[in-house]
Image (spheres, rainbow, N blue to C red):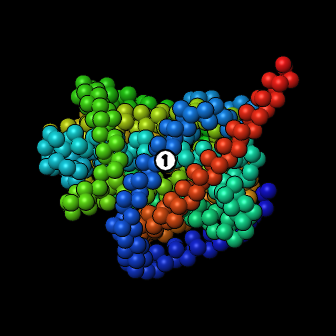
Amino acid sequence: MKKLTSVFWITLAITLFASAWGSLAPANFETISANVKNYISIHFGWYYLLIVSLFVIVCLYLIFSPYGKIKLGKPNDKPDYSYSTWFAMLFSAGMGIGLVFYGAASPVSHFIKTPPLAEPGTTEAIRDSMRITFFHYGVHAWAIYAIVALILAYFKFRHGKPGLISATLEPVFGDKMKGPWGKAIDVIAVFATIVGVATTLGFGAAQINGGLTYLLDIEKQFWVQLVIIVVVTGLFMLSAYTGLSKGIKYLSNANMGLAAILFITMLVIGPTVYIANTFTDTLGSYIQTLATESLRLNPNSDEERQWVMDWTVFFWAWWIAWSPFVGIFIARVSKGRSIREFLSGVLLVPSVVSFLWMTAFGATGIQTQQNGADIASLPDEQVLFVVFEQFPMSVFLSIIAMMLIGTFFITSADSATFVLGMQTTNGSLNPPKTVKFIWGVAQSTIAAVLLYTGGLTALQNALIAAAFPFSFIMLLMVYSLFKALRADRAALQKNDEKTTNKSA
């Protein structure tokens, strides 16, 4: 089980090629990847809106259907982690660093520069900015993760299949998934994971550098970000060496503790009543417009349609591209839970936490902008620190924020090395430390090279392009799940009938 497969070598070769292209010809790489991304967005925007809405519907159906009772594991299996640790682990892997990076920047940007419908800077633009932020970080995002995670956990822990994306399609394609086609599917999943984590490492290094600029007047330079990446790489490799039940578990709980300190402090010293009012109003608006917003494409308005392409379609593609990594990790830590318990937890808890976080920092950022601090013109990585500057304890808040970015940073990279090791050793639940070390160094090297050449944007484009073929794989995974669930339920009913007959 722990032997390196051809997926390891193929994906490593593709990754090295993409990195070399991005570093030696960054302009060419960015132009081509942007053209591919734009073509997909323009011609298949409707497709992304439909499939992500479908994933939400499938999740809700499974929660309330008889299938919800089926356990992700054998009948007597118990969960490996408590609820608090489970929530912390899935949230840290799935969304953490993005909330810190964009918690204030995204709502302020939509308020001043890119509101979906209203005039920039108006009261209506505030409502639009918060509602659309809820939409992009809410149930739809977590439904994408939940679908992949559920299907992997179901086939791995209930049917004993390898923890591979290809193994989930065996009910549809049979043994063909053990050949070249299966390898191709796994390569797509592994490559999406590498690229996604490399971009996250780049963004994390940039934001920590932004914090150092604010606190210590250290300029934003590549060598500073390189040192940050080297330090973080050493820390997450140390965490990876200790294993899943120690390193990631403790880091995930530390993430939630630091996040709670930062959130509660902002809630107390910030505009508390305004935050509470904004949360309540936005939650109502989000629920009221959920169906309409899910399928809004504005075919008769070029400007509005382009906004949907640039934002909603981009976000859906981004979450799909991240879903192999996040889904595999969430599946690994979810053994022993029922389908109903799993989906309710994965859909609702992280969504509500995201809403609370985005309201606390987004509403505070918007009010800061209205009070005269032009934070909308700042780079995204500096917005949060300038918001803190408007309040007492700003240095304390900035230090906590940087610590939180660092722990999220380490947790995401640590989780990724585990997932990459698992996917390139035929689904081993405990991949060799050497394999995790190789992937850890590869991720950090790619991030450093692309930061140096300015290739992170091109890598983002490549990630969005990679999401397109994986979306078809996800649809096949859903079909495969229902095919297996029907057979599973029929077998359970047959056993129940036999038990009833014997009792009679």
Find the residue positioned furthest to the right.
502
Amino acid type shown at disc 1: Phe
Q: Residue at x 69, y 71 (%)?
A: 180
The residue where tag 1 is placed is: 55
Find the residue positioned furthest to the top.
504
Q: Quadrant of the N terminus?
A: bottom right
The answer to whether residue 311 of the structure is visible from this angle is yes
**Most foreground residue, 422 or 246:** 422
Q: Is residue 101 left or right of residue 485?
A: left
The answer to whether residue 410 of the structure is visible from this angle is no
Q: Quadrant of the C terminus?
A: top right
Residue 173 pos. (x, y %): 68, 61
Q: Is residue 89 left or right of residue 164?
A: left
Q: Residue at x 22, y 39 (%)?
A: 127
Residue 214 pos. (x, y %): 32, 48
Q: Residue at x 58, y 57 (%)?
A: 476
